[in-house]
Amino acid sequence: MTFEPPAPGTLASVPLYERPEVHQRRWFLLGILCLSLVMIVMAVSSLNVALPTLQRDLDASSTMLQWIVDSYALVFAGLLLVAGALGDRFGRKGTLLIGLGLFGAGAIVSGLASTATVVIAGRAVQGAGAAFVMPATLSLLTAIFPPHERAKAIATWVAFAGAGGALGPIVSGALLERFWWGSAFLFNVPVVAVTAIAIAVYSPRSQDDTATPLDPRGAALSLVGLTSLLFGIIEGAERGWTDTLVLGSFVVAAVVLVSFIRWEMVAEHPMLPVSYFRDRRFSVGSAVITTSFFVMFGWFFLFSLYLQFVRGYSPLEAGLATLPLPPMFIILSPRSAEIAARIGSGRTMALGFLLVGAGMTVLAPVTPDTPYVVLAVALALMGAGMAITTAPATTSILSAVPMSKAGVASAVNDTTRELGGALGIAVIGTLVSSLYRSRLDLGGLELPAGAAREAEASVGQAVTASSQLDEGTAGRLVERAGDAFSSAFGLTAIISAAIVVVAAILVLRTFSSAKELEAEAAAVLAGPDGSTGIELAAEGVAAN
């Protein structure tokens, strides 16, 4: 039966995690919430291996392919803060169910589409659904777990988020081996149905008991500002960073986001109190998430292109090639809370960044013929680094806000992921494209003008153009394009490694030491007063 809230005057003031019926099924509920999360994350990564098939079957241009990926991220990131606030005010269970419905509907539209334009529209609907799902899962998690277990539960949530990103290409690749490209979308539908039923039956209701009024002005400003910012980032990679439309988008984003900040500073009931950013757990945690996903999203996008266009892997082979990554997330993320309790959250995140940097360094000398074992080592290092970086950062963000704002805090965590990821794909993608063109040598190849232009545009278009040439010329073109892309990829890996090393140094200089962190955690109280109660002290971890 569906859980009903207690009658007035009975258990209404009792936190969810203290109610026996919730406490008994908390780990089952965590599994359901993580399943919802995995679908959201897989919706991004699974398309990486499907893009070549979509390009071929739908005759999609490179711009269309970009928007098939980015329409999801644009709507997702733009709506996150609004969706998180609505969940806090009207109920996280309800917003989660609405989000699942939208996500499933978008999957159906995209999976049955006959044109790239319809796929883009379906992806936008999925993005809207994801915006309601992701913060609801994390804020529900904080409500149903007692303080001494929350860090471990959050780390498990992060583990599944990372594993979902790695499993997406595998699932999508396996489907594409036997079915058409639409199966990469439609497989979500039965999973959505089962998950929604489980949430409806077993999840308790959770919301801001103080019934804080909404902030319509702040919601509108955040929606316009974040959407404009993300649009400028996405289009900047395609049109160039000095394009009039791109610059106009950044100007609009700057003006609107500054207006948003100024409004939130004076609003009686702000959607996102700016004072949260004065807490270094919140501000540094957000910066760490942004940097992590800047590097990893950009790298994932390029790695998929490298595997399929340079090494000639099939979609399934490309997915399976990422297998060293998920186990590192699943094994190390739940243990990150214990590591943070022992050496400090700042040192834990810095260590994670250094492991990611080591993985990037391993990739620096990559060539089309690099042994796979080298790639596997790099994947394992980066997976380990992301696992012990993102879990403490997420916990830090949530530990800095009252329980009544858990949805907004979760949305901030998710927004930083999406903005960092979109910026990573745009900036790192643009850098690789520029380096690829500068390193591509077409001298001595007698190519038609159209084929030469395609080859210079990207490694994927070079492979496509080769199919129209004689066997000898096609082989040389593919080889040179692969060499150029590998060279660009390796140099970008060095730059990415430098970024995360600098990030590690900054985190060490600005974040808490172990003793300071324990003092901060001890100051966070749990209970009906509205605080989160995230405790990372050693005794809390030991109780797990």
Image (cartoon, grey):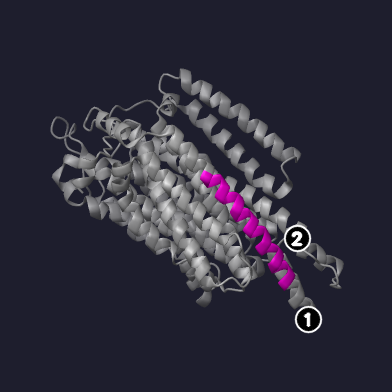
- Tag 2: Cα neighbours inside 10 Å, few (<14), some, or many (≥20)? some
Classify residue 395 by image quadrant: top left
Disc 1 target residue: 472
Classify residue 278 by image quadrant: top left
Q: Relative to 87, say whether 237 is above or below.
A: below
Q: Residue at x 47, y 56 (%)?
A: 382
As shown in the figure, which amino acid type bears the numbered disc 1?
Gly
Q: Does 336 sit left or right of 273 as displayed?
A: left
Element marked by disc 2? helix
Q: Residue at x 72, y 72 (%)?
A: 478
Q: Tell me where residue 134 appears, x and y as whole percent.
A: 41, 47
Q: Nearer the viewer, residue 298 or 67?
A: 298
Classify residue 523 by image quadrant: top left
Q: Relative to 178, say whether 228 is above or below.
A: above
- Tag 1: Cα neighbours inside 10 Å, few (<14), some, or many (≥20)? few
Marks 2 and 1, Cα distance to the nearest angstrom? 21 Å
Disc assigned to residue 171: none
Disc 2 target residue: 439
Element marked by disc 1? helix
Q: Tell me where residue 277 appears, x and y as whole percent.
A: 44, 28
The prevailing secondary structure element of the residues shown in magenta is helix
Q: Residue at x 53, y 26 (%)?
A: 260
As shown in the figure, which amino acid type bears the numbered disc 2?
Arg
- For marks 2 and 1, the one nearer the N-term is 2
Q: Is residue 477 visible?
A: yes
Q: Residue at x 76, y 82 (%)?
A: 471
Q: What's the magenta region?
A: 479-501
